Amino acid sequence: MFENLTTRLGAVFDKLTRRGALSEGDVDTALREVRVALLEADVALPVVKDFLASVRDKAVGQDVLKSVTPGQMVIKVVHDHLVEMLGGASVPINLAANPPVPIFMVGLQGSGKTTTTAKLGLWLSQRQKKKVLMASLDVRRPAAQEQLAVLGVQASVATLSIVPGEPPVAIAKRAIQTGLLEAYDVVLLDSAGRLHIDDAMMAEAEAVHAAVQPIETLLVADAMTGQDAVNVAQSFHARLRLTGIVLTRVDGDARGGAALSMRSVTGCPIKLIGSGEKLDALEVFHPDRIAGRILGMGDVVSLVEKASETIEEEDAKRLAAKIEKGQFDLDDMAKQFRQMRKMGGLEGLLGMLPGVAKVKKQLAQANVDENMLKRHEAIISSMTKGERKRPEIIKASRRQRIASGSGTSVQEVNRLLKQFFETQKMMKRVTKLGQKGLMRAGLPGMGGGGRPPGFPMR
Amino acid sequence: MASDGEKRGFFGRLKAGLSRSSSRLTQGISGIFTGRKLDQAMLDELEELLIAADLGPATAATVAKEFGRTRFGKDIGETEVREALAEEIAKILAPVAVPLSIDPARKPHVVLVVGVNGTGKTTTIGKLAKQLRDEGRMVMLCAGDTFRAAAIEQLKIWGERTGAAVIAREPGSSAAGLVYDAMVEAKAKGADVLVIDTAGRLHNKADLMAELDKVIRVIRKLDPEAPHSTLLTLDATTGQNAHAQVEIFQKTAPITGLIVTKLDGTARGGVLVALADRFKMPVNAIGVGEGVDDLRPFDPKDFARGLMGLED
């Protein structure tokens, strides 16, 4: 559905001249595509318009560098401006006040406040060695207070005792009081999800805000939020003077345009992002990564991080040593297949790579999918240990046995072996040439390298 | 693209832009269509208003174009535009307005509820249980979200409120195992409906989707035709990612209908129009609040009129 912006702009500019400065016409054509990309990424329309207006000013008359095409030049300008608007450097949580420092978490229902509160509790207690107390002011949703209590136990962060029937403002005051008496550094106040147009609930939040005077009031918002993000952020900001935004579910595949919308209308920095269901999945916000995502250009950094998460470092070292000695065998290959599947399969991986929309399409046509990885694993599993170590001994009758053992055909076994030998050959070449050689040679099957030349890789 | 001469800062311009758009869609329309002929500029603005309601750029373009095809160059009043657009949108939505139907011959009729985290699965189940109980059915709920802290307690409270039995296990236990037990028990007790809650999951997490697949396989072991209804909850605040949610969830689960939640906010769930156009997926109900009675049938006319800001 969402086509890669690079591909789309590529198609537009293929017809245009490839040198010189960007003319107004070039830029306008390109910006129409950028507009659609931003809208598909859920950036709010007024923000899109203003964004495009300022990008247009910047892009017109820019010299197209020799190394790049006009399309890539426009993308670079757009990307850089996007990073700038998302707020260059990251802003840490402000704890500069007399303890206990009150932090107030607000947001719509289901945006992930309670989970984020627990994550932040863990973050502050582990990374910043703070003594943290958490309290849930959610007296509306059934079992919401229990939820925070359970998370508190999981995170080894203290939670305020639950008094049934106690109203939110009273809970907040009691939390601060407890924080003072028991010498906590930070008091995190989780609140009930509320609609920004629910006047009674917003008034309640204002009352809490007035009672505890939080140092940080963080809006917790879902990265999947659509055009309404501006209304939500604006309303919350108007009534509660937000100091920051936490973007949740960034581990989903939403392009996260809401980040730009909310940042723009409130001027508040995006301080943290939630990137998983586990309690340690909270990260500092990196504008450049989200920028790439909004533009549909993939997210190389996240890919690398995901890879390092999934692949055990020990394993990786062992594999590297093996490759160096030219001992890469079928066991290693099977391991790689498994890791690939763990990382979300081929499609998931390719989704994160810039400039591979075309490859992705080809893959879809060639029916290279999860199942193929599984079949390959099955084939390798049907081999004997000896065969896996020394695949060259696998001749006709062994192939037949492996095929029937894995429920595949001899052709498939042949194909896998061929692929293996090619990989092995390539790896030998790599060890000879070093890393640089790999880039020059290009990964086979990847259609000659991923990222567009000249595009900054961060 | 406003490249106005005065040197206002970015935020100044942004503010001006936003004060325009944050006022409701309808006010936008009245601004455009007071005593003018329908021309391209007006159509463009119209398209933008639809985009602002989350219809997505492609669908907004189609709807605006279709609208202009028959009325181009005509004098057109504000209410007429709204009415006509609402009609256009209702036309797209009409085929997907299908209420959830429970087959009384099945004992139990199995309803599986799936969706992304925080879209309102458990709350929807609570409301659904109430409706089914009011219809005099014997309802059992299965607390299949064994992952999120206190999700089980939350469903138990809904069970108490609505008089539905809740089948649950320890937090952290296998969802598939629990679902098996629930199926057995619901059959033994002759329940009319078994509603199965599941943990929220992002559709791009292969392992979590595999877990869902396993739950469905287990259900089918005991009743090859179950789940008879599989509902996907969609948060109305969600933007274009709803496409990916529907597309990928239906690869794993036999989604039979959508429940659009949180429509009581300012988000109008316009992405539904695009979804109806693309997937033809039935919309079984909508959620308009946290109360037990806040699950309503999906009425395409009302929804389209709401989208256009028309009173009922």
Image: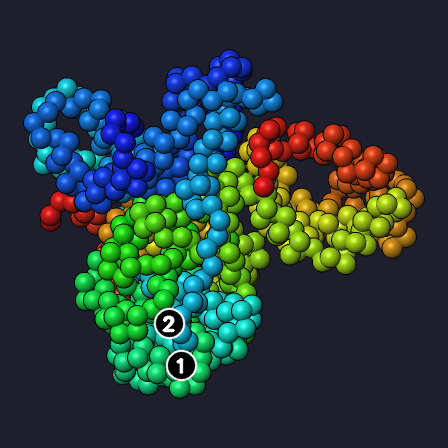
Q: Which residue has dot 1 on it?
A: A179
Location of residue A102 by image quarter? bottom left
Say if residue B242 shows up in the picture: no
Three-letter amino acid code at the position of disc 1: Gly
Q: Dot 1 falls on which chain?
A: A
Furthest residue toward top = A17
How would you rate the neighbour count of disc 2 (Cα within 10 Å): few for under 14, some for 14-19, many for 20 or more?
many
- Residue sitting at 48 percent across and 36 percent down? A80
Can see residue A285?
yes
| Three-letter residue code for mark 2 | Pro
Q: Residue at x 46, y 41 (%)?
A: A83
The image quarter containing residue A346 is top right
Which residue lies under the disc numbered 2? A102
The answer to whether A132 is drawn above or below residue B312 in the figure is below
* Residue at disc 1, secondary structure: helix
**Residue drawn 64% across the image and 56% down it:** A309
- Residue A190, position as x, y percentages in the image: 37, 70
Left or right: B55 in relation to B293 = right
